[in-house]
Image (cartoon, helix red, strand yellow):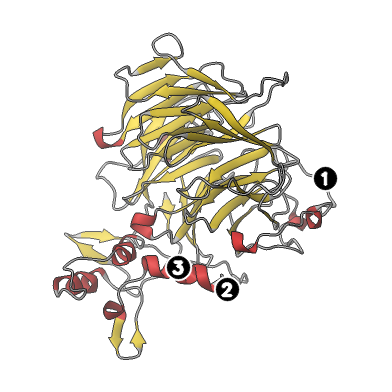
Amino acid sequence: MGYAMSRLEIESELFDGGNTVHEASSSTRPGKLFPKVDDEISQLTNLRSGPNDRLHQLVPGKQQLPVSPVRMLAGRESNYSGKGRFSSADRCHMLSRYLPVNGPWLVDQTTSRAYVSQFSADGSLFVAGFQGSNIRIYNVDRGWKVQKNILAKSLRWTVTDTSLSPDQRYLVYTSMSPVVHIVNVGSSTTESFANVTEIHEGLDFSSNDRRYSFGIFSVKFSTDGRELVAGSSDDSIYVYDLEANKLSLRIMAHTADVNTVTFADESGNLIYSGSDDNLCKVWDRRCFVAKDKPAGVLVGHLEGITFLDSRGDGRYFISNGKDQTIKLWDIRKMSSDTSCNLGYRNFEWDYRWMDYPPQARDLKHPSDGSVATYKGHSVLRTLIRCYFSPEYSTGQKYIYTGSHDSRVYIYDVVTGAQVAVLKHHTSPVRDCSWHPRYPVLVSSSWDGDVVKWEFPGNGEAPVLANERRVRRQYYD
């Protein structure tokens, strides 16, 4: 079961039609003080998720937060804003207090490790990718019915990533191969077997003059759906022009695997990348000063980067690292110097089979340029992913992540508190996804389970521990 760790709200319970409603809560670990987050990101977060001043002012000069739902609704009925409705910040203030911690309810259960799971931009579809060559697309609005069951072509090792096009007509998937395959999601065929029932067109990301193979760890559609950006095991970033059907750009970006890439915002001009060389880099396609030279570098992680998620404003992003931390970055603080990142580790360690050294847990990079650091989850064995919570319902007030210890962790961006920890899985949770509009979160794990967490629940009985089948250990 998921749990919230202590009360954030003065009211302990609210009653709606006789049902007890559990709200978000927060906790900081004893003895651990979270450094004050950057004033600007704190203000931006509060602007997106804070209520109107008239609603949280008890008497002149005295405020009370959070504002209760009853007070919020009363303010709306009295037309405090003059518009007869909640503002987007009011909506986020209401919805962000109710975290998807109830459950879980089973979406799917397989004998194969789940590597990827993501909602579509509008939340109507959900994609899950498994090591056993299967990618399933569920129709959320139709009771999570499988809309498309894709059997991947020429899979090497596992499905490393998937991405839905903005119009939700196409899906691309990657593996440890330079060829990215694209599938028509909108076709009427449910069973999509590569080149048997449907064509899975291959997009070759390798240059004509290169004879060696490489794998792709990360792929993303641009906002306009015209391009793909990918990060690879040959230390490079690739941009593929879908309209011209050809590779348009290759950047020798890092000195180790590029585990994660993403577009910074809707313009598509800025690209963020993260690598096993411990660096996050920013690439501005409008002004390449020199070949393979980034616009800037962000130093602070002590180990490799497993995932990046952009806040979507072309300024802030978060990174998950093998040093067991999530870091929040402001690209205005980026540097051009990478020399300060070399030779810092003085111990041997491999995250694929070793625990993180206890003596390294409290180390800090001497040139750490991050805005904030979040700790508590575990990043081992696989490229575990982290995200900002949805803008529509939470104002991106939270950060959430999978974890090697089989849990999902939710942090408050501003305070750094763990506001919730979701427990169900028996193996690492590599990916998880929060519905863009509703308090629903789906987690997927190497135990083969894909489950959803909700608020306040859907009336069905959650999955019980004794109902889980016995599986082999994830490290077998």
What separation in Å lies between label 2 and label 3 (alpha carbons)? 15 Å
Residue nearest the viewer, comparing 169 with 1: 169
Vertical order, 453 against 237 (above or below): below
Could you say whether the residue bearing mark 2 is in a helix, strand or loop?
loop
Percent of width and height locating residue 435: 36, 46
What separation in Å lies between label 2 and label 1 (alpha carbons)? 33 Å
Which comes before the other along the chain, label 2 or label 1?
2
Residue nearest the viewer, comparing 168 with 92: 168
- Residue that numbered label 1 is attached to: 348
Percent of width and height locating residue 393: 34, 56
- Residue that numbered label 3 is attached to: 44
Q: Return the residue found at the far top.
A: 196
Vertical order, 176 against 56 (above or below): above
Label 2 environment density (alpha carbons within 10 Å; few <14, some 14–19, many ≥20): few
* Number of numbered discs on residues: 3
- Residue that numbered label 2 is attached to: 36
